[in-house]
Structures are given as C-alpha cells and as structure tokens.
C-alpha cells in the first residue's frame, strides 16, 4: 500500500527515515590528566625551593659576585676565552672539512691517513693533548723548517719560544676539534643524495666545484646543529687550559680565589658568563638552522604543495 500524500509530507519535513534514525552528536569530554598536573606541581615546587635556597644562601656572597662580574680581570679573561673558542673552531671546521673529504676519497692512502688522525685525536683526552702541546719542548727542544731526509734546513727556533701557552691551547683545541668535525661534516655530505653530485658532474662541474657549490650548501642543514653544539662545547672546554697556566676567564678567576679563598662567589661569576655566552650562541645557531633549513620540513612541504596547486589552477584557467 503506497503512503498517502500526508505521510510523504511528514517524512519530507522530518528529513526522511535516515534523519529520524541518525544518532545525536557525541559530546566529547577531555580526559583529565591529573598525574601530569601533580608531577608538574611537585617539580615546580622543588625547583622554586632550590632557587630560593641558593639565592638566600649567605655563603654565595652576592656582593663579591657583583664586584668581580664586570671587573677588568674577568673581562680580559672572557675576551681570551672568546678568542680561543672562535679561532679553535675555525681551525677545527677547516680541518674537519679537509679530513671528511679525505675520508670519502677513493684514494686509499688519503682515506687511511684521515682515519688514523681521527682515531688518535678522538681516542685521547683533550686534557692530555693540552699538556702534551704545552710540554712539547721536552720532546723536541728545537723545531726545524726544512725538507726531511735531505738535510736541507731553512730555519730553526726553540720550541719554548714558538709553542707558548696560547699557541699550545690553540693547537690542542683546534686539532682535537678537527677530528670530531670531520665526522660531522662527513655525515652531512653523506646525507646529500648522490644524484645531486651526478647531475653537477654531468653539467661539466669539477669535483671540487661540485663539493663547494652543490654538496656542502645542502649538507649545512645537517652540519649546523651539531657544529653549533661543538661551538658551545668548545666555549666550556677552554677552561681546561688553566692546567698549563692559561689566563682565560676561568684560569684568572682560579688565581684570584686561590689568594682570597672566595671560591664559590667566583665560580658563580664564571657560571653566569658561560650561561650568557651559551645563550647567545644558541640563538645564533637557531638563526643559522632556519636559514639553511629553507625548503625542508613539514611547513615547507605544505607551502610547496599549495604553490603547486595554485600553478595547476592557473594553468587550467589559461
């Protein structure tokens, strides 16, 4: 029996049988993560208690901290710390690129020499290397400039006059950093697709030009974060040269508290400056990562897809 016109009107008004059987919308209630809030509260409470205890501790002697925070002796030491950091990192980065290229070379001699260099400097503590360079005069009293095994000597000088404290620190820190930077650069080079090099070579570019213009710029996206960490680590590693009488910031402050016995206040001064410089380096690292990371990541991929869709739409309307 067919439905009457009045029944059909009622079904149409109500949206049909499907609308009548449709369930109500689910009202989602978010889950309460009480454990997260409790743990966050406990950790925050303990952290605040620790900070307040440290700030109100009279043994910190904040007046002494303020006295030495911007004193000339601290500023001279800080300047030397920055010089050592950036010069040693320049030596390490340049040496690391060269060693990475040697490690990836098809020449077995170059690859083996680079591997031995990296093995030695990564296998010995930088603290020991600093002492070795400082006492190099006991191993080689005189340094000669000439051709080995030929007897030709163009000049000579006493080791103690050439390898002074500053030079010994630079050699130890820079050459040690080159070993670590080599592996970082090698990882960055390997991350670049082989097709990039093949395409550049097919265009007539030399291997050196391909490495400089094609491979390394793309590898920087991988190299920059780790190299930034190495720079921050180098800033703090410079404090080790105090063992050979280096007068960087920590070495100078050590000399002061050895005479005044104000150990904790001067250590606080050192920590404040290390944290300040580290924060600046971290911001610089973030800017470099953003610059060299253009074209990579989820946001960049979505933007590229949107541009492709717009180009396709314009092509259809043309």
Image (cartoon, rainbow, N blue to C red):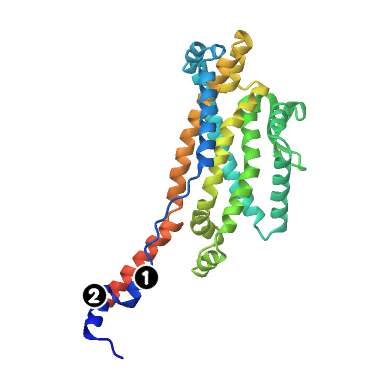
Label 2 SS: helix
- Residue 87 in the image: state x and y as whole percent: 55, 35
In which quarter of the view is residue 22 placed? bottom left
Q: Which mark is residue 13?
A: 2
Label 2: few (<14), some (14–19) or many (≥20) C-alpha neighbours in 10 Å? few
**Left or right: 315 as drawn, with respect to 245:** left
Residue 303 visible to the viewer: yes
Can you identify the residue that label 1 sits on?
A: 22
- Residue 224 in the image: state x and y as whole percent: 52, 47
In the figure, 1 relative to 188: above or below? Answer: below
**Left or right: 88 as drawn, with respect to 28:** right
**Left or right: 145 as drawn, with respect to 318:** right
Front one among 315 and 34: 34
How far apart are the alpha carbons under marks 1 and 2? 15 Å
- Residue 81 in the image: state x and y as whole percent: 55, 27
In which quarter of the view is residue 268 placed? top right
- Residue at image position (52%, 36%) is 38
Label 1 SS: loop
Q: Which mark is residue 93?
A: none
- Residue at image position (51%, 20%) is 52
In the figure, 20 relative to 54: above or below? Answer: below
Q: Residue pushed farthest top? A: 260
């Amino acid at each position: 029996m067919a439905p009457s016109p009045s029944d059909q009107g009622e079904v149409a008004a109500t949206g049909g049988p499907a609308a009548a059987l449709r369930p109500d919308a689910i009202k989602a209630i978010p889950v309460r993560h009480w454990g997260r809030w409790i743990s966050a509260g406990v950790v925050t409470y303990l952290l605040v208690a620790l900070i307040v205890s440290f700030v109100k501790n009279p043994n910190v002697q904040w007046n002494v901290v303020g006295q030495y925070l911007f004193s000339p002796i601290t500023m001279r030491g800080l300047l030397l710390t920055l010089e050592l950091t950036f010069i040693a990192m320049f030596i390490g980065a340049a040496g690391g690129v060269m060693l990475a290229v040697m490690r990836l070379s098809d020449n077995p001699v170059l690859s083996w020499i680079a591997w031995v260099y990296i093995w030695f400097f990564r296998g010995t503590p930088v603290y020991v290397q600093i002492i070795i360079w400082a006492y190099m005069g006991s191993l080689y009293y005189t340094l000669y400039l000439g051709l080995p095994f030929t007897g030709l000597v163009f000049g000579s000088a006493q080791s103690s006059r050439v390898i002074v404290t500053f030079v010994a620190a630079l050699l130890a820190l820079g050459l040690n950093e080159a070993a670590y930077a080599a592996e970082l650069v090698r990882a960055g080079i390997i991350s670049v697709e082989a097709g990039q090099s093949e395409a550049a070579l097919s265009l007539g570019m030399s291997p050196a030009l391909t490495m400089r213009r094609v491979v390394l710029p793309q590898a920087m996206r991988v190299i920059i974060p780790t190299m930034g960490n190495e720079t921050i680590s180098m800033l703090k590693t410079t404090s080790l040269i105090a063992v050979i009488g280096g007068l960087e910031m920590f070495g100078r402050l050590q000399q002061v508290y050895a005479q005044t016995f104000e150990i904790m206040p001067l250590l606080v001064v050192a920590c404040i400056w290390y944290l300040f410089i580290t924060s600046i380096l971290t911001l610089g690292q973030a800017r470099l990562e953003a610059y060299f990371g253009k074209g990579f990541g989820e946001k960049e991929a979505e933007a590229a897809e949107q541009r492709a869709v717009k180009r396709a739409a314009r092509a259809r309307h043309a």
